Image: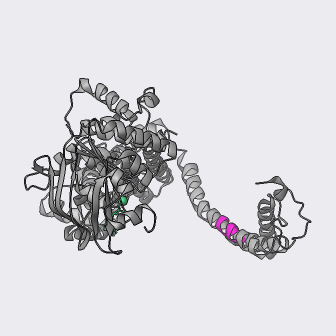
Amino acid sequence: MAKRIDVSGLSAYYGAHKAIDDISMTVEPRSVTAFIGPSGCGKSTFLRTLNRMHEVTPGGRVEGKVMLDDENLYGSHVDPVAVRRTVGMVFQRPNPFPTMSIFDNVAAGLRLNGSYKKSQLGDIVERSLKGANLWNEVKDRLNKPGSGLSGGQQQRLCIARAIAVEPDVLLMDEPCSALDPISTLAIEDLIGELKERFTIVIVTHNMQQAARVSDRTAFFNLAAVGQPGKLIELDDTERIFSNPSVQATEDYISGRFG
Amino acid sequence: MSHAIQDRPVSVAPRRGSLSHARLPRWTPAAIAAGSIAGGIGIGLGAGWHSKVQWGMIAALLFVIGTYALTSKVEGSRQAKDRVATSVVWVCFVLAVIPLLSLAWVTVSKGIGVLDGYFLTHSMNGVLDAEAGGGVYHALLGTIEQVLIATLIAAPIGLLTAVYLVEYGGGKLAQAVTFFVDVMTGIPSIVAGLFILATWNLILGFGPSGFAGAMALAILMMPVVVRSTEEMLKLVPNELREASLALGIPKWRTILKVVLPTAIGGITTGVMLAVARITGETAPVLLLVFGTKLINPNPFEGAQSSLPLYVYEQFAVGTDAAMARAWGAALVLIAFVMILNLVARGIARWKAPKTGR
Ligand SMILES: Nc1ncnc2c1ncn2[C@@H]1O[C@H](COP(=O)(O)OP(=O)(O)O)[C@@H](O)[C@H]1O
Ligand SMILES: [Mg+2]
């Protein structure tokens, strides 16, 4: 069910401030695309335009087109709520719902948008937790609060919660930056498995991580602080890390700036 | 912390460049306090002052000065300032607690005499002012009904207003609502009572009833609920709202199922505090509920009584028996509010997001 994302001429604003400028790119289905670039260049902003979360921020505004297969997410009749069911998201800091048990956290997406059969709920929760490699660790305490898990487990719980609603695309904004190396490894392995079923876009500050998990890498940059961020290049990860076509990319990757 | 630092004998002189220095033993503040109280009493007796307040003030002064003098001599001036700050906090704490404890003590000691099963289950029907006997049942019933109705009106409106302000607001309308809520917070209770009297009773022509009083109480309660709920909703991390929205959950369900449950403990506490505040209101009840000696279980028809009103009436009568009843009712009122608060805390603790660690 994974879908292709085709972005053209996309700019995003916070009030009067233009955060990203005229971005066009294609994200292939069943692949992992990594976004790298210095802080503030608009990676998170761009990621959030892909599931219409950008407009949740007060003053958030988007121009341009995002095609998901053959449907424009910013078409006039498109319901942002429906878009977010199709394009799931995992945030930088693990954010399980504190009032809910582990089970309820995973079931939240289904329960709260009312699209499930009661008899299937248990199966879906189990499948999602297995999909997030968390089942064995939590199967005996599904009724305990999700906030009692470790940071890495919480993040996998959030991934389980996101995949439980069966999205086509999974967006991840620095999903490992709050985690220790072992939890990070667990999530990276998981990403490798998830790409069989989903189109995955991941923002990361960690070059090795981008090199390890992604098939394609996009490098973003900004001319100066306060200027909008731009897409510099998007290419196969191997090429970006060995022989990028733009000098700025090579400088960034080899640590000469940023 | 290593024990070596603490166990240094007091006599060791501070050495430059060393991390350790002379310390007063832990029981020093208690000793100084005991000494200053003794000093306060001694000076008070010696000077022939009768007022215990003066004794207390001398003792407090001696405590602060004594602490400073002793600490600066033994531990140095920085520690002395630190200890003085601590002792001032203690003095203020004691000053705050004394009226509270004496209020509780006086009410309990004067009220406990009449408080029994009979007092709680009987009205003043046929009881003469000077006679002992009678009870608060009619007043307790009135208070419970009026407060319940006021809460049923004010809590949902206040809650929804706060949800609007925090989750949807931001424009001119929200600013206006915030402004009016602030204004409402400052409305004196007698004015709320007069407002209902002028509209409900005089213009619309209804007689006194528990419901009329409840409406005035609701006016007083609403801004408190709005304010406290607003603060609680603002404490809910934005990440939770985003997590929910990103799952494709509509905004209204996000608020209902994620935001409100996360804040429910604090919201309940706020509502209960507002309830406690209006439970003691006398002025609007006096105007609108009117007061009666009889049991009137119907809040929508005819005069009712209420606990604060009952206290006021009995106090105005002024006979020994009536005074005893007034204190008894005051005790019932305090107990009622206290129970509400305990229930609120219970709910808050029970509903608070669990960490599970
Ligand atoms: N909520 C916001 N309100 C206003 N400006 C924002 C907001 N979030 C981000 N920005 C601005 O948008 C730009 C891009 O930020 P972001 O997308 O977070 O960058 P990145 O994720 O690459 O570090 C920055 O200049 C930042 O200051
Ligand atoms: Mg970011």
Return the residue nearer the eye: A58 or B316: A58
Mark yes or no: residue B350 visible. Answer: no
Residue B326: image location, x then y, percent: 46, 52
Return the residue nearer the eye: A178 or B139: A178
Mark yes or no: residue B146 visible. Answer: yes
Q: Which residues are magenta?
A: B84-90
A118 to the left or right of B265: left
In the image, is residue B94 above or below residue B301? below
Secondary structure mostly seen in magenta is helix
The residue furthest left is A77
The residue furthest right is B11
Residue B200: image location, x then y, percent: 17, 59
Indicate the quadrant where residue A154 lies.
Answer: top left
B155 to the left or right of B206: right
Picture residue at 49% right of the left edge, 52% below the top: B327
Residue B99: image location, x then y, percent: 58, 62
The quadrant of the rendered image in which ligand 2 is seen is bottom left
Residue B145: image location, x then y, percent: 30, 45
Picture residue at 35% right of the left edge, 48% below the top: B143
Indicate the quadrant where residue B62 lies.
Answer: bottom right
Q: Is residue B349 magenta?
A: no
Return the residue nearer the eye: B38 or B356: B356
In which quadrant will I find the N terminus of chain B?
bottom right
Q: Is residue B86 magenta?
A: yes
Colour setting = one colour
